Amino acid sequence: PPAPADHLPPFPCPPSLSSAPTPKLAQTADGAVGTHVGHDRVDSRFASVIPQTQIPPVLPAFFEDPSGQSLAVKGTAFHKVVMNGASKASPDGGVTYTGSTDFQPSFSRLKELVEGGDFEAVSTWYVGLDGGGCIRVLTLAGPSRMVIDIEH
């Protein structure tokens, strides 16, 4: 992902976000992680709309949806990304995202991004960090993207 411009908003604390719901299913199209001067980035791309999202800080233990199987996540501080109305399964039974579901970049802050589940139009991911930190969330168009920046 390109480096951020100087006009980006600050990193708010506490690091949580709630966005407005969307009228239709958000189809996950791509995902990536990157590191930049001052922050690490999680980049989620969608075929059209961006889903309603909450990103609260959480504590272990973590579990896969819907199986309930235990899930290990690298790091010492964690966030749970819950996207309501989002899925990599398309309404016609196809799959819109076949990329990695476990990123382990070992960046300055970001240690792991792992899928917790994609079930009944709720997509869940866990963000494992080295230490706490503030985050900012941006929604972008062309393509529809949600980026989570983790301050160093």
Image (cartoon, grey):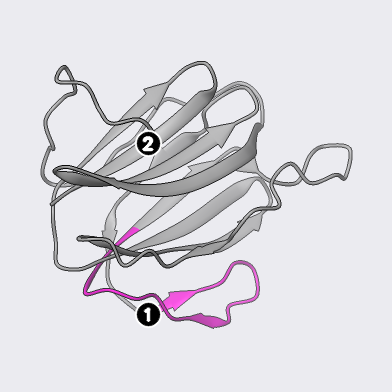
Tell me if 45 is positioned left or right of 41 in this view: right
Amino acid type of the residue that numbered disc 2 sits on in the rendered structure: Val
Q: Nearer the viewer, residue 90 or 99?
A: 99
> Which mark, by number, is residue 123?
none
Q: Secondary structure at mark 2?
A: strand
90 on left or right of 41: right
Count of numbered labels shown in the rendering: 2
Q: Nearer the viewer, residue 89 or 122?
A: 89
Which percent across, then down, holds residue 11?
A: 13, 37
Residue name at image x 25 percent, y 28 percent = 4
Is 125 colored magenta in this rendering? no
Q: Residue at 21% of width from left, 74% of height from top?
A: 76
Q: Where, by quadrant of the figure, is residue 111 drawn?
A: bottom left
- The answer to whether 134 is drawn above or below residue 1 in the figure is below
From the viewer's perspective, is the residue at label 2 or at label 1 nearer?
2
Determine the residue positioned at 53% across, 45% down.
31
**Circle nearer the N terminus (2, 1):** 1
Dividing the picture into quarters, in which one does residue 87 lie? Answer: top right
Task: Identify the secondary structure beneath mark 1.
Answer: loop
Farthest right residue in view = 92
Apparent side of residue 30 relative to residue 16 in the rendered image (left or right) = right
Between 55 and 39, the one lying in front of the other is 39
Kindly identify which residue carries mark 2.
147
Residue in the picture at 62% in, 39% down: 28
